[in-house]
Image (cartoon, grey):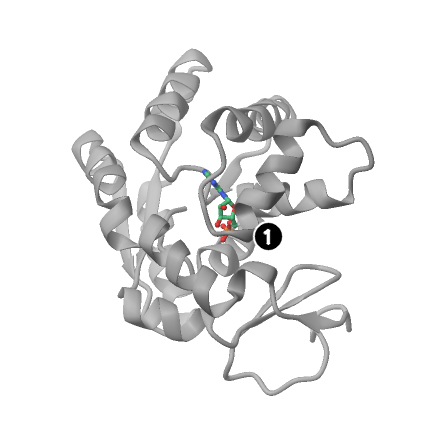
Amino acid sequence: MMGPPGSGKGTQAKKIAVQYGYTHLSTGDLLRGLAGKTDLTTEESQALETIKHGNLVPDELIYKLVFHKIEDSIRAGQGVVLDGAVRTVEQAQSFNQFFVDNNLNQEVLVLEITLTNEEALRRLSGRRVCARCGEIVPLSMAVDSCQKCNGELIVRADDDAEVIKLRIRKQGNKAMAPVIDFYRQLGILKTVDGVQSIEEVERSIAKILEISN
Ligand code: AMP
């Protein structure tokens, strides 16, 4: 699952995981989850600082966090939704090699949710997330607590105005174009218009997955 920050890839990835019984693996969530660890390695503490500033963490850490989880899930007979796991061409190549090594390369589909950088900026400025379950609450939803688990709603540290701009510069459409091209050339890219409502995006994705399955 690919798309600029704010495109709704996390929201849709969770929905797909529930609907198809897949494991949802968000590298952003896995990285934020490191904050709860007591014995952080230097690499992990540095990554937490990196996230705060909207920069990309080193590729090797991404592989360490996610490859073994994919293997565990596949071994248990469960598919995987990778949410934001690939953000550079180097990562795309390494994931590809990983899929080839694990005989999974025929099984991969890349879903891109498109959104202009302007709309991404608007959505990220003012959205809240549940501190307990990570549910994303858009600006338009005037609620005081998480509608899923009643948890407290907070603003993510990297949803700060300056950091949002940096994230869009580093992870927005221009930065991601070479990665998208990589997948287009492989013939495994499907694109969904992310400016639609959450339900419409969900329906568009469902159509693509029905055809591909
Ligand atoms: P997200 O929750 O998807 O917005 O990700 C939050 C942050 O985690 C990003 O702004 C990056 O700092 C970091 N991150 C997540 N996935 C990756 C990745 N594949 N490569 C590098 N950094 C990542």
Quadrant of residue 164 within the rendered picture: bottom left
In this orientation, does residue 35 appear? yes
Identify the residue shown where x is 60% and y is 36%: 46
Q: Where is residue 27 in the image (x, y as percent from the top left)?
A: 54, 41
Identify the residue shown where x is 19% and y is 39%: 181
Quadrant of residue 9 within the rendered picture: bottom left
| Mark 1: few/some/many CA within 10 Å (<14, 14-19, 20+) | few
Q: Residue at the far bottom: name it.
A: 142
Q: Position of residue 42 (x, y in %)?
A: 66, 28
Identify the residue shown where x is 46% and y is 69%: 161
Toward the viewer: 98 or 164? 164
Quadrant of residue 200 within the rendered picture: bottom left
Q: Position of residue 183 (x, y in %)?
A: 25, 35
Q: Name the residue under label 1.
A: 18
Q: Helix, strand or loop at disc 1?
A: helix
Toward the viewer: 56 or 187? 56
Q: Where is residue 132 in the image (x, y as percent from the top left)?
A: 75, 61
Q: Is residue 193 left or right of residue 165?
A: left
Q: What residue type is labelled 1?
A: Val
Toward the viewer: 79 or 29? 29
* Picture layout, residue 195 above or below residue 185: below
In this orientation, does residue 206 appear? no
Q: Residue at the far top: name it.
A: 101
Q: In this view, does 105 lie to the left or right of 138?
A: left
Q: Residue at the far right: name it.
A: 38
